[in-house]
Image (cartoon, rainbow, N blue to C red):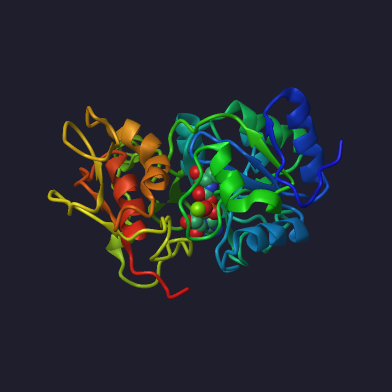
């Protein structure tokens, strides 16, 4: 079956729809699909034109490299050099919300545009049956950033993708809400020391425990960020966002955590995993004209709280004039 380019094509992730997604991807088209973290906007990572279409659809600065998704760890070997540390981390955390930055193989088939010309490639194996089935059906490594316009709130439902990207995507596969709700942790294993580039769905504590050492953090070096995706303003709703608020103004939406009086609660019991899963959907829900701003209660800075605070800081960062 064919898709009309000027309509939004959203389908439940049935085996037939997954097979169609695989065929579209092989054909160089864009497909949005669910992962355990957020919905991804996928393209064949070996096809420069398909990868270019991702940047075009997202309105994303092209210097920002993409994560390449695989369905099986064995698929990595021809893309990147898999280090011993990488093998250990993969055995423990894959499939799951952990992206590894590894040295690119000389004959790697991955589009240079996907890795923004870097000599490394970010790879991940998602813990979501639909994501893995789509990748396997395509028979290709799949480049997939979050399926939203650049800088906006990441999608945790198929409807969010439809609102943000609409007809820019050949097919949106609906697999329900994303379990984790924030993007994968990005761990750089290409250098001398393992370095955290982006906090995410696997906590820093769990990684440090598995590696038996402290990770180099983005805050350890004040020079230009190595992960170019770490733009200041990002994940931003339309309304201004204020952080660490204990006394919201009467016309502000108050996003709370734990037992408190608020407009919406990330987790009434203060559970940080539940809070991460709810974060992007609640930022969207509160982004309404009757409020002057979204005020956010303090979030503890440990476990998944680190990833939540990272996203919130970017949502609250000064925006470039439109
Ligand atoms: O959970 C996720 O990771 C989602 C789902 C769809 O898998 N994807 C996602 O992709 O968040 P994206 O493109 O929004 O974020 C990619 C991150 C950026 O921070 C980017 O700079 C970093 O990974 N990255 C990609 N390739 C890199 C590389 N070679 N070196 C350093 N950082 C890299
Ligand atoms: Mg994103």
Q: Going by the image, does 113 lie left or right of 233?
A: right
Residue drawn at (32%, 46%), measured in percent from left and top?
308
Residue drawn at (31%, 53%), measured in percent from left and top?
291
Give whichever of 189, 319 is nearer the camera. Answer: 319
- Total labels: the figure holds 0
Horizontal and vertical percent for residue 133?
Answer: 68, 29
Residue drawn at (75%, 60%), measured in percent from left and top?
48
Q: Where is residue 299, by image quadrant? A: top left
Give whichever of 247, 152 is nearer the camera. Answer: 247
Residue farthest to the right, as pictured: 1
Q: Is residue 65 visible?
A: yes
Q: Is residue 12 above or below residue 222?
A: above
Horizontal and vertical percent for residue 295?
Answer: 24, 52
Give whichever of 40, 229 is nearer the camera. Answer: 40
Q: Going by the image, does 246 lie left or right of 107?
A: left
Give whichever of 239, 65 is nearer the camera. Answer: 239
Horizontal and vertical percent for residue 46?
Answer: 74, 53
Horizontal and vertical percent for residue 55?
Answer: 64, 62
Q: Going by the image, does 248 lie left or right of 303?
A: left
Residue drawn at (55%, 52%), measured in percent from left and top?
148
Q: Is residue 147 visible?
A: no
């Amino acid at each position: 079956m064919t898709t009309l380019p000027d309509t939004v094509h959203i389908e439940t992730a049935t085996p037939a729809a997954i097979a169609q997604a695989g065929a579209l991807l092989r054909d160089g088209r864009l497909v949005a699909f669910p992962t355990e973290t957020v919905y991804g906007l996928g393209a064949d990572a070996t096809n420069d034109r398909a990868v270019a279409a991702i940047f075009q659809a997202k309105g994303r600065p092209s210097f920002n490299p993409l994560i390449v998704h695989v369905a099986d760890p064995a698929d990595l070997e021809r893309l990147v050099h898999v280090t011993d540390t990488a093998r250990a981390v993969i055995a423990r955390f894959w499939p799951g919300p952990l992206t590894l930055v590894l040295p690119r193989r000389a004959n790697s088939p991955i589009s240079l545009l996907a890795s923004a010309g870097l000599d490394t490639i970010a790879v991940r194996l998602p813990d979501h049956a639909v994501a893995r089935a789509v990748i396997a059906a395509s028979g290709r490594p799949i480049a997939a950033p979050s399926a939203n316009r650049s800088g906006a709130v990441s999608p945790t439902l198929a409807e969010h993708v439809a609102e943000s990207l609409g007809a820019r995507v050949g097919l949106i596969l609906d697999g329900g809400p994303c379990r984790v709700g924030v993007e994968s942790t990005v761990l750089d294993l290409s250098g001398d020391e393992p370095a955290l580039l982006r906090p995410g769905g696997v906590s820093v504590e769990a990684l440090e425990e598995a590696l038996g050492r402290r990770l180099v953090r983005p805050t350890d070096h004040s020079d230009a960020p190595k992960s170019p995706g770490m733009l200041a303003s990002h994940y931003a709703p339309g309304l201004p966002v204020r952080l660490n608020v204990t006394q919201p103004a009467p016309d502000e939406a108050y996003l709370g955590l734990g037992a408190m009086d608020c407009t919406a609660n990330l987790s009434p019991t203060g559970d940080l995993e539940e809070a991460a899963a709810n974060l992007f959907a609640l930022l969207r829900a509160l982004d309404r004209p009757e409020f002057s701003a979204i005020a956010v209660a303090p979030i503890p800075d440990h476990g998944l709280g680190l990833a939540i605070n990272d996203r919130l800081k970017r949502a609250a960062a000064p925006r470039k004039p439109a």
